[in-house]
Amino acid sequence: DIVVTQSPDSLAVSLGERATINCKSSQSVLYSSNNKNYLAWYQQKPGQPPKLLIYWASTRESGVPDRFSGSGSGTDFTLTISSLQAEDVAVYYCQQYYITPYSFGQGTKLEIK
Amino acid sequence: QITLKESGPTLVKPTQTLTLTCTFSGFSLSTTGVGVGWIRQPPGKALEWLGLIYWDDDKRYSPSLKSRLTITKDTSKNQVVLTMTNVDPVDTATYYCALVGIAAPDLDAFDIWGHGTMVTVSS
């Protein structure tokens, strides 16, 4: 099974500042035949289901603000929020969908400093 | 508009069998590439992927739970059913169903989720 590990577990950032969350998979999730990374990012606010933010490691879901961006390839990935807004307070998860079981990371709790 | 909704018991006794139903609308589970998955989240903890059923009845399960899980679909009723046998208090969680493959056949990220249903396992 692929193990997905996020860092840090929690993060406090000032409003308007950049927030960066890292995600590492125990094996590559890059499919060489199509050059796609099978990695997604979700945002979960209290009392709500997760919401898909980014797929293929860097493609924003429709309606997701462009302050959210994903990068990385192979085993190392990053979610960046360029200018933190109050509504971005949430827990963020990455997930690999390269091979089942499609494992999630343990989550990163993002708060306002 | 695509929606999914989970339903089932809120309280189950240890050793019993849990049956949850995901009723969906706005898509067909006979469309190539589409699948419905189950994910759970114990209170205050992380998401755990449980399994997926695809349009062609291909089923994938978490290896750690495979012996206890069964996922079936009823395309005519627009439902997917999760059955978990021999439940234990550690199975207490919010259970979500979610959709994959609607945007692209190989896009198995969960792009639309139900609101979840909380299940407590206790005697």
Image (cartoon, rainbow, N blue to C red):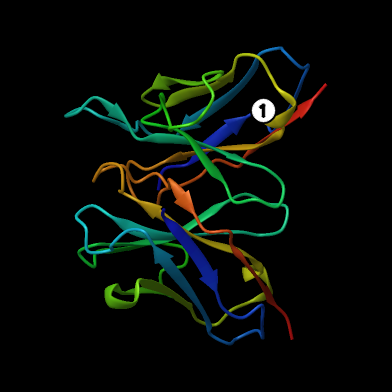
Q: Is residue B109 left or right of residue B90?
A: left
Image point (62%, 39%), residue name: A107
Left or right: residue A63 versus residue B73 is right
Name the spot of residue A16 as percent of width and height, x first. Answer: 72, 13
Q: Quadrant of residue A11?
A: top right
Q: Nearer the viewer, residue B73 or B41?
A: B73
- Residue B62 at least partly seen: no
Q: What is the chain identity of the residue bearing mark 1?
A: A
Compared with A17, B49 (above or below) is below
Residue sticking out furthest to the right: A113
- Identify whether A49 is placed above or below A84: below
Q: Residues within 10 Å of mark 1 (few under 14, many from 20)?
A: some
Q: Up-down: is B122 above or below A108? A: below
At 37% from the left edge and 43% from the top edge, which residue is drawn? Answer: A97
- Report the residue that reaches farthest toward the left: A33
Residue B55, position as x, y percentages in the image: 24, 62
In the displayed structure, A5 sits above or below B88; it is above
Indicate the position of residue A70 as horizontal and vertical percent values. 47, 22
| Residue sitting at x 79%, y 25% | A112
- Asked if residue B87 shows in the view, the reply is yes
According to the picture, the residue beneath numbered tag 1 turns out to be A8
The amino acid pointed to by label 1 is: Pro
What residue lies at 72% left-to-right and 32% top-to-bottom? A89
Q: Nearer the viewer, residue A31 or B31?
A: B31
